[in-house]
Every structure is written in C-alpha cells, then in structure tokens.
Image (cartoon, rainbow, N blue to C red):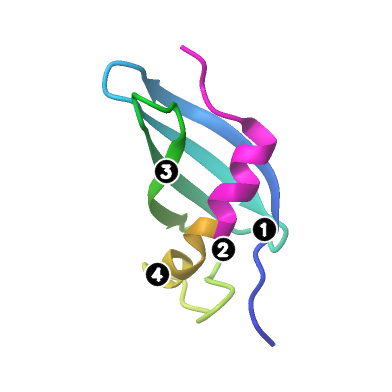
C-alpha cells in the first residue's frame, strides 16, 4: 500500500516578511506532525516549500522508526499543497 499523506490541520508558526521565509506546523491524519519551511518569491508572491521535518511525537508511518528519518521528504510537495490550502500564506 502506498503512503498518501492527508493534512488535517495547518498553522503558520513563524513569518519573516523581510526575506520571505515562513514556517508551518501540520498535523496529518495518521497523527504525524511535520514542520514545513517555505520561501516566498518576491516578484510573484507564490510560496515554495524548501524542507519538511517530521517532529518526533509519533514513529514514522513509512519506515516505523521513532528517531530522525527523511521519509517525509518524498511527500513534501503533496503535504505543502494541502497545508497551503488550509492555512494560506502570510500576508504581512
């Protein structure tokens, strides 16, 4: 069975309008928490995900490790698209 992440909640936790970086913490349907780091393009205003880190509250749903792994990096585009739909981008 292929892993399909589903974002349940997303919250913007930090925003730096000077350099266009902001962070979001998301909770997935399988109780996994992740921190997403975005950069905003100054010309277009669109956000692009740079990194995704799994917060170590639950074991990884893919490899079942309960220490740092990089499995969520494969799904960063899917997770970030869902998170941006829920929380949007910071305005100022």
Q: CA distance from mark 2 to mark 1?
A: 7 Å
- Looking at the picture, how far across and down is residue 9, in whole percent? 69, 42
Give the mark, 2 or 3, whose residue is nearer the N terminus. 3
Residue 57, visible in the rendered structure: no
The residue nearer to you, when weighing 73 against 64, is: 73
Task: Name the element at disc 4.
Answer: loop
Give the mark, 1 or 3, whose residue is nearer the N terminus. 1
Q: CA distance from mark 4 to mark 2?
A: 9 Å
- For label 1, the residue is 31
Give the mark, 4 or 2, whose residue is nearer the N terminus. 2
Task: Name the element at disc 2.
Answer: loop
Q: Residue at x 54, y 70 (%)?
A: 59
Q: Nearer the viewer, mark 1 or mark 3?
A: 3
Q: Residue at x 42, y 43 (%)?
A: 48
Q: Main secondary structure of the magenta part?
A: helix
- For label 4, the residue is 67
Q: Are marks 2 and 1 in contact (CB under 8 Å)?
A: yes
4 left or right of 64 in image: right
- Looking at the picture, how far across and down is residue 19, in whole percent? 27, 23
Give the mark, 3 or 4, whose residue is nearer the N terminus. 3
Task: Name the element at disc 3.
Answer: strand
The residue nearer to you, when weighing 53 against 59, is: 53
Q: Nearer the viewer, mark 3 or mark 4?
A: 3
Q: Which numbered tag is attached to residue 85?
A: none
Q: Residue at x 58, y 45 (%)?
A: 26
- For label 2, the residue is 58
Q: Which residues are magenta?
A: 78-92
Give the mark, 4 or 1, whose residue is nearer the N terminus. 1
Q: Is residue 87 magenta?
A: yes
- Disc 4 crowd, CA 10 A, few/some/many (<14, 14-19, 20+): few
């Amino acid at each position: 069975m292929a892993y399909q992440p589903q974002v349940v909640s997303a919250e913007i936790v930090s925003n730096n309008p000077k350099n266009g970086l902001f962070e979001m913490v998301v909770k997935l349907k399988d109780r996994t928490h992740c921190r997403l780091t975005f950069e905003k393009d100054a010309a277009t205003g669109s956000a692009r995900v740079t990194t995704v880190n799994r917060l170590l509250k639950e074991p990884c749903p893919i490899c079942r490790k309960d220490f740092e792994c990089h499995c969520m990096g494969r799904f960063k585009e899917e997770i970030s698209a869902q998170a941006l739909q829920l929380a949007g981008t910071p305005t100022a």
